[in-house]
Image (spheres, rainbow, N blue to C red):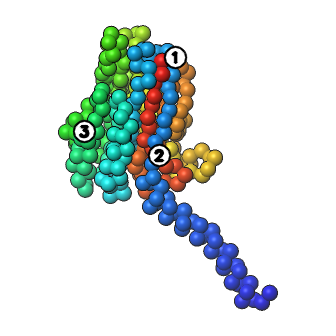
Amino acid sequence: MSQPNCLSRALFLLGLPMAAGMLSLGYGWAIEPAWWEVKKVVIRSRRLPAEFNGYTIAQISDLHLSPYNRAEKLRAAINQVQDLQANMIVLTGDYVSTLKHGEAKVLAEELARLSAPDGVYAILGNHDWWTDAKVVVGALRQAGVTTLQNEHVAIRRGLSRLYLAGVDDVMEARADLRAALQGVPEDAGVVLLAHEPDYADLAARDARVFLQLSGHVHGGQVRLPGMAPFARPPWGEKYPDGWYRVKKLQLYVNRGLGVSFPPVRLFCRPEVTLAILKAA
């Protein structure tokens, strides 16, 4: 083979990985972040009253509104959530990454379109505190979303109760499970909202909590098929995404809708979750 042919072949072979990398980067930046999936998970528990058998909870998390995560994407996801016709909608933190481009106004306007028979509830995440928690809570309230900060509410079906509790952000050392469950009967069943999933190790100590819904990790955001996530933030190292059992507690970790830096997703699509509760 002549020298020019050898050089051409070498350049071609060297260019293949570069081309594949550029294609992956383009896909991860432009396509996958806007290509969410609806994940349905069945949760069976003896703590669930029979009157709540088949009860549905739609969950979205980690919107991270910013120039990388715009209103159009959130609007489409909310349409998807509404189509699920869940009994309740919950939001598990990190609504904004910045407040410099009108994100609070977008948050209030778009979340106001959410509605469910038993209400829409939210907790705060670490990024909400790192920006301005007071502004974020104000936007949530303006949208008609009930924010749970170490509090709970009771959902009624006849004489039976299902409790929804929410702890404030764990990374900011603001979570107080005892306060969140104060007044909840010892034989009750509780669904807990906690932004950081590794909090399940603490929540599992209370037998009343049979399900924890979390976000925070984005599933790692960039990962290779069949491999664990490369990046895991504090309080998201053990349970990055999906379903887990922690002692008698069941944990589900939503992969989130938005992205943080770098603003790409690869083999880790955004997610809307529908939890279907079954009385065991």
Residue 195 spot, x, y in % from top left: 40, 35
Camera-side residue of 6 and 78: 78
Residue 5 spot, x, y in % from top left: 73, 86
Kindly indicate whether the residue at mark 2 contacts the one at mark 1 (C-beta within 8 angstroms): no
Residue 80's image quarter? top left
**How many residues crowd around disc 1 within 10 Å: few (fewer than 14), some, or many (20 or more)?**
few
Residue at the right extreme? 1
Camera-side residue of 259 and 43: 43
Kind of residue at disc 1? Ala
Q: Secondary structure at mark 3?
A: helix
**How many residues crowd around disc 3 within 10 Å: few (fewer than 14), some, or many (20 or more)?**
many
Q: Earlier in the sequence, mark 1 or mark 2?
A: 2
Label number found at residue 6: none
Camera-side residue of 175 and 251: 251
Q: Residue at point 44% right, 24% down?
A: 54
Kind of residue at disc 3? Leu
Kindly indicate whether the residue at mark 3 contacts the one at mark 1 (C-beta within 8 angstroms): no
The residue carrying mark 1 is 280
The residue carrying mark 2 is 37
Q: Up-down: is 145 above or below 271?
A: above
Q: Is residue 195 visible?
A: no
Q: Secondary structure at mark 2?
A: strand
The residue carrying mark 3 is 140
